[in-house]
């Protein structure tokens, strides 16, 4: 009987030590994950994490430069924004979450009352339109920039 109690006690101690180790591993993993996505630099005051920064450096965003320059946007800044928001996807990226609704390369949000805002700002109320047309997306991003500066993208 004493042997059984001793074994049961050791088993419980081993389980709780293992559980503690798993919890510690989980916390350590979260810290590493958070560190991996730490801000790698700033472009035009926009925080840029290492992933989007590598997209810009790879040249994947270069196709946007003439479109951005044509509407008077700061090219390197908006290439960085596009890298962060969509990976500079040629066809835009569909995002539909509780807080975001967009196909924009620049993260233009159409959730809630925002379709009215974009309609008044650049004539677009359909959230799919920016992803379908580069010129529409860039025009709306330029209208927001000229009205509010970089505030909409400083996150």
Image (spheres, rainbow, N blue to C red):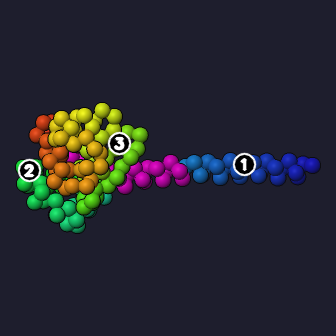
Quarter of the picture containing the C terminus is: top left
Are the residues flagged by discs 2 and 3 in contact, CB closer than 8 Å?
Answer: no
Give the structural element (helix, strand or loop) at label 3. loop
- In depth, the one of 58 and 60 nearer the eye is 60
In this rendering, the label closer to the viewer, 1 or 3: 3
Q: What's the mark number on residue 71?
A: 2
Segment tinted magenta in the rendering: 25-48
Is 69 within the magenta? Answer: no
Label 1 to label 3: alpha-carbon separation: 47 Å
Which mark, residue 100? 3
Earlier along the polypeptide chain: callout 1 or callout 3?
A: 1
> 109 above or below 60?
above
Using residue 33 as the reference point, say whether residue 87 is left or right of it: left
The crowding category of the residue bearing disc 3, from other C-alpha atoms within 10 Å (few below 14, some 14 to 19, many at least 20), is some
Q: Residue at x 16, y 59 (%)?
A: 64
As drawn, the label of residue 13 is 1
From this viewpoint, is residue 44 visible?
no
Q: Residue at x 16, y 53 (%)?
A: 135
Name the quadrant containing residue 127.
top left
């Amino acid at each position: 009987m004493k042997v059984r109690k001793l074994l049961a006690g050791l088993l419980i101690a081993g389980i709780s030590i293992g559980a503690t180790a798993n919890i510690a591993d989980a916390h350590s993993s979260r810290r590493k994950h958070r560190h991996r996505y730490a801000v790698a630099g700033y472009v035009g005051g926009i925080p840029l994490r290492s992933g989007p920064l590598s997209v810009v450096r790879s040249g994947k965003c270069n196709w946007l430069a003439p479109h951005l320059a044509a509407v008077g946007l700061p090219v390197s800044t908006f290439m960085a924004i596009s890298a962060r928001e969509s990976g500079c996807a040629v066809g835009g990226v569909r995002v539909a979450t509780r807080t975001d609704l967009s196909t924009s390369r620049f993260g233009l949000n159409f959730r809630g009352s925002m379709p009215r805002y974009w309609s008044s700002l650049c004539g677009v109320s359909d959230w799919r339109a920016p992803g379908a047309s580069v010129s529409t997306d860039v025009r709306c991003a330029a209208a927001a920039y000229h009205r509010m500066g970089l505030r909409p993208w400083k996150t």
